[in-house]
Image (cartoon, rainbow, N blue to C red):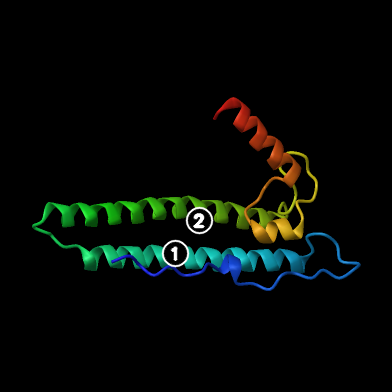
Amino acid sequence: MPQEKKEFALTDFTPYVASADEEYMSDAQLEHFADILRKWKQELMEEVDRTKEHMQTELENYADPNDRASQEEEFSLELRTRDRERKLIKKINKTIDKIDKGDYGFCDACGVEIGIRRLEARPTADLCIDCKTLAEIKEKQLGV
């Protein structure tokens, strides 16, 4: 039986409202994003634990080949999802490290501010919208 999906912390935060004279990536902003990332990572880790528990408790040796195939397909799908989440956890850890080093919020390609709203939509973003758009166009043209 499929597990109930839970909303990630990425959708469960209050948008940051900067004061008029607040410097970009102030301590308060950095803490805001670090908190979002920590909550998101925690929920992903909890999902990993739930999957492990689910696969251990739901494992049955069905006599019917169709039932067995259905269970194997369900487990395969869960494992692929967890693998994507494992990669996301690595990216979250890398992003938290950037926050700790003071490098967060600026485009890796051109150095401009990525922007608070873009970072709230995708806290692991490391390219501004212009550089990301160019990268996607190049990727599409090269067929990668």
**Going 86% across and 66% down the picture, which residue do you hit?**
22
Q: Quick check: can you spot residue 128?
A: no
Q: Residues within 10 Å of mark 1 (few under 14, many from 20)?
A: some
| Residue corresponding to mark 2 | 89
What percent of the width, then of the height, locates residue 141? 62, 27
Asked if residue 122 is positioned above or below residue 27 in the image, the reply reads above
Which kind of residue does numbered mark 2 sit on?
Ile
Write the residue at 60% across / 72% down: 12
Task: Name, please, the residue furthest toward the right.
Answer: 21
> Which residue sits furthest front?
66
| In the image: residue 74, left or right of residue 12 | left
Residue extending furthest toward the top: 142
**Disc assigned to residue 45:** 1
* Marks 2 and 1, how far apart at CA: 8 Å
2 and 1 marks in contact (CB < 8 Å)? yes
Mark 2 nearby-residue class (10 Å; few <14, some 14–19, many ≥20) = some
Name the residue: 75% across, 51% down: 114
| Quadrant in which residue 23 is drawn | bottom right
- Give the residue type at disc 1: Met
Q: Is residue 69 visible?
A: yes
Query: Could you tell me residue 144's position as x and y percent?
Result: 54, 30
The N terminus appears in which quarter of the rendering?
bottom left
